[in-house]
Image (spheres, rainbow, N blue to C red):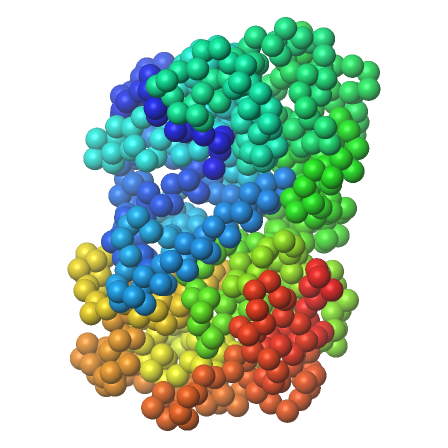
Amino acid sequence: MGVRGLHGFVASSCPHVCTVVNFKELAERHRSQHPGGTPAVVVDAMCCLRYWYTPESWVCGGQWREYYSSLREFVSAFTAVGIKLIFFFDGMVEQSKRGEWVKRRLKNNREIAKIFHHIKSHREQPGRNMFFIPSGLAVFTRFALKALGQETLCSLQEADYEVASYGFQNNCLGILGEDTDYLIYDTCPYFSISELSLDSLDTVMLCREKLSQSLGLRLADLPLLACLLGNDVVPEGMFESFRYKCLTSYASVRESCDRKGNVILAVADHISKVLRLHQGEKKLEEMLPLGPNKALFYKGVASYLLPGQKSPWFIQTPKDVVTLDKQVLSMSSDPESKQEVPMCMDPESRQKLPVGTDPECNLEAAVCANTEVKQEDPVNMGLEAKHQVTVVSDPEILKVARAQHVRAESYLVYGVMSSGEVECSSSLEDATDQALPSQAFVYRPVRQRVYSLLLGGGGGGSSTGPAVKEWFVYSGNPLRQPDLVRPLQMNLPGGTPSLRQLWLSQEPGIQAQRLDTLLACFDLSSSREELQAVERPFQALCCLLVYLFVQVDTLCLEDLHAFIAQALCLQGKPAVELADLQLDHIDPRAVQLATLLVRGLTTLVLVNGACGSPWEMADFMPWHLFDGKLFHQKYLQSEKGYTAEVLVEQNRSHVTRFHTLKSVVCKACGKENRPIVSRRHWRPHHAGRWGRQGSSSHGTSSGYSRSGHGQHWRDQGPGKRPTGVLGLPRGCLGVGCMFASE
């Protein structure tokens, strides 16, 4: 994350860049300098997740009640000294950063494989050195912070630019995060979350002015340095030979620095002593070996320029003046010029965006042909299809979706509607488990119906709506290209309602229609009566459990008992009691079951938002419904054949509810011809078949297949894409999905 090698260089070679500061003292100073103003810190939440997650247990699916408590303590520490916090979350992955996103996800997969190997070898959670954040943490943290009364925003691009811009434009006390890009942006001070002591509110401030002085550079040179070293936009290998040449000609190599440190010093020296001689006279491509990577390099430099800022490395010439989005833009080095660095104004955005950071606005129009970008890196750039227009034509509905996205009130909805592209990161899933499917496939039919709702797909099961690009991580997916997933028509009497009805209508009965649509997304309309009779907050849980057990026939009665018992026992348990819970051992299957449930809860966030919020968001927040260690305990007990009374800890009211909820789930599954039986009643060597079995391959009005015949999806081999009847769940067969490789 950030500029390659810069963090280590600052720590080892420029320690004076780091200064210990105290937030309480900084806030007092700010108030004395700005009477009546409230000191504010803008927080890059994505950088902070692993530091906020303090519970000891992380492999069992998440200690959500403990985590919520730790977030409350974090917020309270700053509130107590009068500091306002503004939290930003990543809302989109920019196309220019897709390659880096893929690289990290593949690395995550290797880490997850090691985690499961450790669990199977030692029957315990690995040490903190192998820590992997629980699935769904970023999604649910947004809603936790909102529940705590915090201003929480979701970016329209990668969050670091919007964080830096917000801090710059709003005179913030500083930025709290862990990303060396904040040493490059010319914005408010940058504070380290990893060095923060919550008790004292001491942390480390990293000073970009001191860094530039140490390197013999100006602040305006830092974006150029970052791109030559490599960052999330410009691949590190692009200028490897250039950096080597700088190092060989560098006369002041420090023995106290490692090779990476001396490379940074050498490149900085080249900028200050060679490139600056021709600054304002020659273009960068005349001084640097940019070749076919010219557009990407310019995009990388421009991505650090905040609203109103200019780069002295951009020369203004007649052919550099371009018109983008009906604005005349230029790359200006004239300090008196009123024209700004190439900017792209989104008519509804909170701020101006640098060219190249908005998916619909591209710097290559200003400096070179787009074909050069594609030559640079077909993996990263070839799929940058420009999303010619937003895939939803109703501007009012798109405006509503955008506003909900920015306020962090929805999940994936705006990405589907604005660009037709979504992603989901790595999950704790065992790639060697042949019986349990990846959550990416289990919930795909639900997403397909949501796509139909959001994009207005066609009818009859074979949707004519546009395919959505899914970058979902699962075993065997090399992520060289997205899966192209077609919308799938829902089976609703009277047809699918419009988004205007679901989102904007105040008519009587609209809430019931919203609920009908939500259940249709899960293909559970036939169980509406049973589910509606369930008390809150267990309605959402039962909906999810019915869907899971219908989709995955390797789930058994013992699994259902564990899911229900933990949800009931969680009610009323304080975080401290859950923290003290001890487990006999860790079971890898239980780890993956927890992942399936939690990813199901994030899917509920998507569906509920798309359907106009028929359920309260709190009803499926994990700190109300799920605890990783508690579920693991109930799973181990259920596997041993413990009775319902023991599972619910001898609580009489819980026993009654247990049997009620179990009856609802079993009855609903029975309607779908899916009996839930004990593992003890399975046939010998029963491995199950993911998805329901049946005789028809195209046999229902909702357009999905009930056939489970064919090659099991886990047997297709690494890198192969499931197609046809190869074990895809109902809803993903033939009519529903296609893949980029086809």
From this viewpoint, is residue 227 visible? no
Give x and y (percent) for residue 367.
75, 26
**Which image quarter: residue 287?**
top right
Q: Residue furthest front?
A: 248
**Front residue of this view, candidates 52 and 60:** 60
User: Residue at the location (56% across, 49% down)?
Assistant: 102
Q: Can residue 104 be seen by looking at this rendering?
A: yes
Position of residue 440 in the picture relative to residue 561 (left or right) = right
Which residue is at the front of the view, 731 or 214? 214
- Vertical side of 427 occupied by 289: above or below: above
What residue lies at 45% left-to-right and 83% top-to-bottom?
687
**Closer to us: 588 or 526:** 588
Residue 163: x and y in percent read: 49, 32
> Is 330 situated left or right of 276 in this image?
right
Q: Say above or below: 392 vs 194.
A: below
Against 291, residue 248 (above or below) is above
Determine whether, in the image, residue 569 is placed left or right of residue 595.
left
